[in-house]
Image: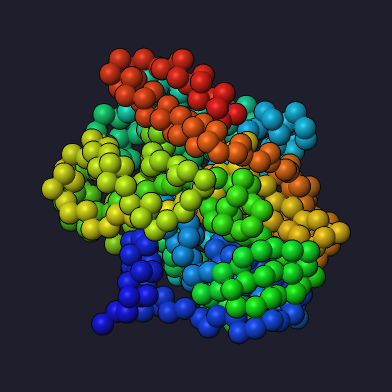
Amino acid sequence: MASSLDERYRTRSLWLDSLGDQLVPRPALAGDIDADVAIIGAGYTGLWTAYYLLRADPHLRIAIIEKEIAGFGASGRNGGWCSALFAGGRDAMARTHGREAVIALQREMRATVDEVGRVAAAESIEVDFHKGGTLTFATSPAHLDRVRASVTEEHRWGATDDDAVWLDRVEARSRVAADGVLGAAYTPHCARVQPAKLARGLADRVARMGAKLFEKTAATEIGIREVQTTHGRVRAEVVVRATEGYTARIAGLRRALAPLYSLMIATAPLPPSFWAEIGWNDRETLADGRHLIIYAQRTADDRIAFGGRGAPYHFASRIRDRFDRDSGTFAELQRVLVGLFPSVAEAPITHRWGGPLGVPRDWMSSVGFDRATGLAWAGGYVGDGVSTTNLAGRTLADLITGADTPITHLPWVGHGSPRWEPEPFRWLGINLALALPAGADRAEFRTGRPARLRNALLERLTGH
């Protein structure tokens, strides 16, 4: 019989539920210790950082502090898109770093998709990696120009038809026969993964490499070359903050990243007759042109895992288990899913879950290291972290070890996002920004025309 602790972890997502008895926490910290590097957070960022540091120097003493278990947060609950998407405005980066630097970052993101697959294979971590690319459908006349423009935008930043291409209705439906598809943008630079397998597998690997992973140990305060936890103090030459959506819980960091929620549902495994009807044979990840982001994958066991934004931001950046579930958002996700694939209307929804993302005020990811204080960080992925965390881990390893490599000069390195506004302005502004996409989508599906006024206001609020 599963313990209540096991059940708490298993119910976080379909992905964690499938791992069952692999979710036993490692022992907590048992008093003060010294380390070379202390990493706060055993999600992808912290685990990749430990992995590449130990590859560079196997003798490093690395302590990883985790409040729950490795992969408990977004790393074990996300949509499983290992993509080349990067959270950050290209024009803004080009103004400060130049066009070629932005193109170099995008090129590195594309290579990072393959790097994740390479490491998983090399380390025998079975993560259901399949690189089928991404289809972004136009499912309304209002989407057509916007989705086509996304391909043009990729080409403006150095992409070729090998990187991004427009598919007409027939071409798009030959890949996935979703209802109402008028065309699609396609990029090959995305792989489907099982997120929790990746997180838990990485945790096991870095532990075998020599990292000390202390689960059920909450970091309460970050100081200069030390971390205070609920079970003792960790003193280290370098302290890495890898807390993403949970950053607001650390003293002094409530306004650094806003925890915004993304929620998901998953069907039961669907029969061969369904897949024969719609295709989806290369297991592409799916999105469409609406403003309120949706994302989907065909899982290794032939479910549809389907997610989207729209859940509210909670006052004062509060994070609670009950916020992972919002009945209205789940119902809307199921409505959209059935709209795309009417024949799943009778399929059972076996899992409903969610969790917080880390969102910086300027919606741009960053990574950096201050050698004078020993403080390092990475995060603010705005939901695009499955691959970006790998680049972050490699970058932090190079910065910490002093390696001067091309990735240490990419434009997100050292970027400082402004802090979010104090409450109640943060609550008002974020929830207004969350309401605008849904309103714009309703107007566009009703009229078939772009909601230009709402779009402009949304761009002003988010900076994109």
Looking at the image, which is closer to me, 312 or 270?
A: 312
On the image, the x and y values in percent for residue 434 come to 44, 33
Which residue is at a point 46% across and 54% down the rendered structure image?
A: 319
- Lateral position of residue 441 relative to residue 166, left or right: left
Above/below status of 344 relative to 44: above
- Lateral position of residue 39 relative to residue 130, left or right: right
In which quadrant will I find the N terminus?
A: bottom left
Which residue is at a point 74% across and 77% down the rendered structure image?
A: 35
Image quarter of residue 337 = top left
Q: Can residue 119 be spotted in the picture?
A: no
On the image, the x and y values in percent for residue 158 come to 65, 33
Above/below status of 459 relative to 250: above
Which residue is at a point 48% across and 51% down the rendered structure image?
A: 318
Looking at the image, which is closer to me, 4 or 221?
A: 221
In which quadrant will I find the C terminus?
A: top right
Residue furthest to the left in view is 346
On the image, the x and y values in percent for residue 345 come to 16, 44
- Lateral position of residue 240 relative to residue 289, left or right: right
- Lateral position of residue 445 relative to residue 413, left or right: left
On the image, the x and y values in percent for residue 448 come to 32, 16
Image quarter of residue 395 = bottom right
Which residue is at a point 42% across and 47% down the rendered structure image?
A: 262
